[in-house]
Amino acid sequence: MSDTTLHRMMETAAHRFPDRTAVDDPGKGTMTYQDLARLSDKLRDRLAGMGVKPGDRVGLYMAKSIDAIVSIFGILKTGAAYVPVDPGAPAPRCAYILNNCSVRVIITERRLADELTGELTALGSVPPLFIIDEPRDGVLPLSRLLQAEDEKNPAPVVASADPGPDGLAYILYTSGSTGKPKGVMLTHRCAVSYVDWCSAVFLPTPEDRFSSHAPLHFDLSILDIYVPLKHGATLILIGEELGKDPLNLAPLIAEKRITVWYSTPSILSLLAQYGKLARHDYSALRFVFFAGEVFPVPQLRALHALWPHPRYFNLYGPTETNVCTYYEVPAQIPPERTEPFPIGKTCEHLECKVVDLDGSTVPRGAEGELVVWGPGVMIGYWNLPEQNAAAFMVDPDGKKWYHTGDLVVEEPNGDYIFHGRRDRMVKRRGYRVELGEIEAGLATHPQAKEVAVVALPDRDAGVRIKAFLSIKNGKAPSIIEMKQFCMETLPKYMVPDVFTFLEALPRTSTDKIDYQKLKETN
Amino acid sequence: MTNDEIMRTVKEYILKTFLPGEDPKALTESTQLITGGVLDSLATLELVSFIEQQYGIELQAHEVDAANLGTLPAIAALVQSKVVART
């Protein structure tokens, strides 16, 4: 395993392939490797000038764009970690995240800056903002600014930092059961060991063209960004709007001759159902990776019928480990198969085992919790000592095993089968959703007295989220009002599908909310 | 076919499919269907399929957005323009 860092990996590729296209943002522009290397140096100098030092965090609060990719490398080159925050999520949640890990600087867009400043002011501290304009008409505002600086002052001001493999590279915030998102801390070693594993298994070439479908705050983005940029390949950016629009996405995948596609099953199902895939030429596509949730076999079969030639891989793993098991879908999907495919075997850079509640390894074939150890595993949650203690199990050899919370069974051939969760976390369109976070959000509604949220399996949508509320006084708000309230309070993928108002929520004999009864309530 | 008829049909479909249990009076001509969270991206696609089948029209990819599908009157206007173009 190499001891390099993410930015040095990209620099090495830039040295070998200076003129190749590193990033392509369809309709907005492209950038070569040498420009990516040079302009991220300029940003590094700017950030250092704003006081960013190795070991700091820098917030990245902007839409996915070439400028955002330049920003990531600029931040890494200062030796700081980047904290990508969803620009589509409600501003209070974003401000919480940026405040929680006390970022030194926030790189953001002009359209987002005022509201963010207001929210940060309410939290008591506003770090310096590096405000850039939105890209439009083929102009990349940050890149243009850095280009102008480079022409004026080509000499580097500071050298790129070497944080070493143990340096923090990024913090990804995921849904937290207590209602506040929690920051998963990942080092250069975590990411590099995973990227090296991808290289060994998928053998990328400089001719490859990788999709970047997932948002930057989602762990799928690590493969999307760093695998192509290690190998001189091209990264094709797909923005949030386009990413959920199968009608426009389908022709783009063909036109851009994408060779490696990686996304949640949700959008792949939509592409098969609505994308009119038979109309386009997908001969360039050689890999389809999916992750984040179970891919129902009927939908996978429908996609496979339209795209029969690529190799399909189920990549499994929580943000805390990134991909930790993988499974190649057979070239022929048996027509009688209905149960989902396995999550597969342990990735070679990690170790997995299945344990019972005491942490003892269960016999092969028995259900237990999957735990993971190795260089890809997070170093912990940002500033949450109690959750860190609960997340890891230290064995007599001193190995720290991460508790995934996923219940699995190991088959005789070493493939793991996913059976469900130990807790109240669900996957919705690939996003991790703690039902407790939705409840905490709903509880802030002025009329809410009691709230409870359950998730029910659904053939088409994967899960349906049902919210139950009792109301303090007066008339219950309309469902439309509740949805509007949720849009302002929670990320979109957490907005419940169904709202039901009850006089009082059912309770168990120990006076806890009776979730079982609610699941059976129509 | 009048705009009111189209709005009535689409409203019934949205209430039944995406807002079970909702008071029909709460869904008005000014309700923001997309930005207000009534229709998420998947629901929008389902609505498009419904409209295409119901009225025998085909919506183009670039027409599927909040400007065309964001309110009941916008949907009615879009359907009318397509039906007129067809005849």
Image (cartoon, coloured by chain):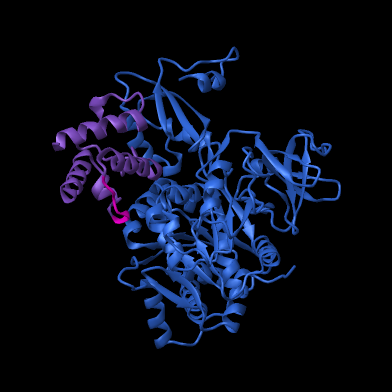
| Residue A510 picture location, percent across and down | 60, 14
Q: Magenta stretch?
A: B57-62
Q: Say whether residue B23 is left or right of residue A209.
A: left
Q: Say whether residue A234 is left or right of residue A185.
A: left
Q: What's the magenta bit mostly, secondary-structure-wise? A: loop
| Residue A344 picture location, percent across and down | 71, 49
Task: Give the quarter of the figure containing the C terminus of chain A.
Answer: top left
Q: Colour of chain B?
A: purple
Q: Colour of chain A?
A: blue
Task: Give the quarter of the figure containing the N terminus of chain A.
Answer: bottom right
Residue at position x 82%, y 37% from top? A360
Residue A62 in view here: no
- Number of on-image labels: 0
Residue A493 in view here: yes
Residue at position x 62%, y 79% from top? A12
Q: Is residue A394 magenta?
A: no
- Residue placed most toward the observer, A281 or A469: A281
Q: Say whether residue A133 is left or right of residue A24.
A: left
- Residue placed most toward the observer, A65 or A394: A65
Most extreme residue toward the top, as rendered? Answer: A509
Residue A368 is drawn in which quadrant? top right
| Residue B16 picture location, percent across and down | 33, 28
Residue at position x 48%, y 56% from top? A215
- Residue placed most toward the observer, A82 or A245: A245
| Residue A181 picture location, percent across and down | 52, 44
Most extreme residue toward the left, as rendered? Answer: B2
